[in-house]
Amino acid sequence: MKKNNYIALLILLGIGLIFLGVFLYNKDLKVAFNDVDISNKESNIKEDSNEDNSLDKENNNIIEIKLSDLITKLDNKESFILLFTGTTCPVCLNYKPVLNALLEEYDLKVFNVDLWAFDAEERTKFNELFLDVEYIPLTTIVVNGQEQKEQRMIGNIPKDNVITFLKNNGYI
């Protein structure tokens, strides 16, 4: 009798591990936590309504685009700076204002795709195009419709490193 209980416990444990594995495998994206305080105490995320941190400002240099717009840009063999983020990703929310200020300083534009806004069909299409995007925020360069994977920056990158990245890629 005890052996049967032991076998049943092992089976239940195995099923639990399988469900956990499936959940973790299908989780939308991992987030690169690079030196980010996600507590509200000292966060760079502005919560005061007078200090608008939204990226919908008219003069914003981070241009939100949908996956279909990105595919069109790639098909048209355009060259641009590309940013992948997630709507509520704390690292992304800290990185975007710093990046935007830098873009304003150098009069540059970045196209941003919110990976957490995808439906199932868009997720499948995105995975066909960018299978190896695992961490966000991810800043990359697209030249003639082709991502330059060796030129990726992942996480909340310090301003000086972003400047070097942009200089090395001929944007400043």
Image (tube, grey):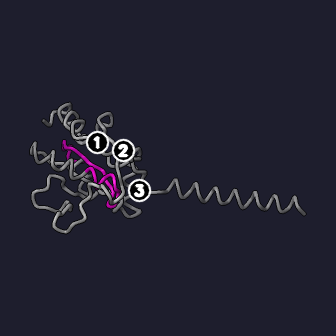
Asked if labels 1 and 3 touch by Cβ distance under 8 angstroms, the answer is no
Quarter of the figure with the C terminus: top left
Magenta stretch in the rendered image: 75-95
Residue 84 counted in the magenta span: yes
Task: State the image coordinates of residue 103 (x, y, percent, origin top left).
Answer: 14, 46
How far apart are the two marked residues, 3 and 2, measured between alpha carbons? 28 Å
Asked if labels 2 and 1 touch by Cβ distance under 8 angstroms, the answer is yes
Among the two numbered marks 3 and 1 on one chain, the one whose residue lies closer to the N terminus:
3
Q: Secondary structure at mark 1?
A: loop
Task: State the image coordinates of residue 1 (x, y, percent, origin top left).
Answer: 90, 63
Amino acid at dot 2 = Asn
The residue positioned 24% from the left and 36% from the top of the image is 161
Front position in the image: 35 or 130? 35
Among the two numbered marks 1 and 2 on one chain, the one whose residue lies closer to the N terminus:
2
Badge 3 crowding class, 10 Å Cα cut-off, few under 14, some 14 to 19, many 20 or more, is few
The residue positioned 30% from the left and 50% from the top of the image is 84
Q: Secondary structure at mark 3?
A: helix
In the rendered image, which residue does mark 1 sit on? 157
Residue 94 counted in the magenta span: yes
The residue positioned 30% from the left and 55% from the top of the image is 42
Identify whether 168 is placed above or below 141: above
Front position in the image: 171 or 132? 171
In the rendered image, which residue does mark 3 sit on? 124
Check residue 34 in the rendering and tell me which mark sits there, or answer none.
2
The residue positioned 43% from the left and 56% from the top of the image is 28
Front position in the image: 67 or 32? 32
Amino acid at dot 1 = Ile
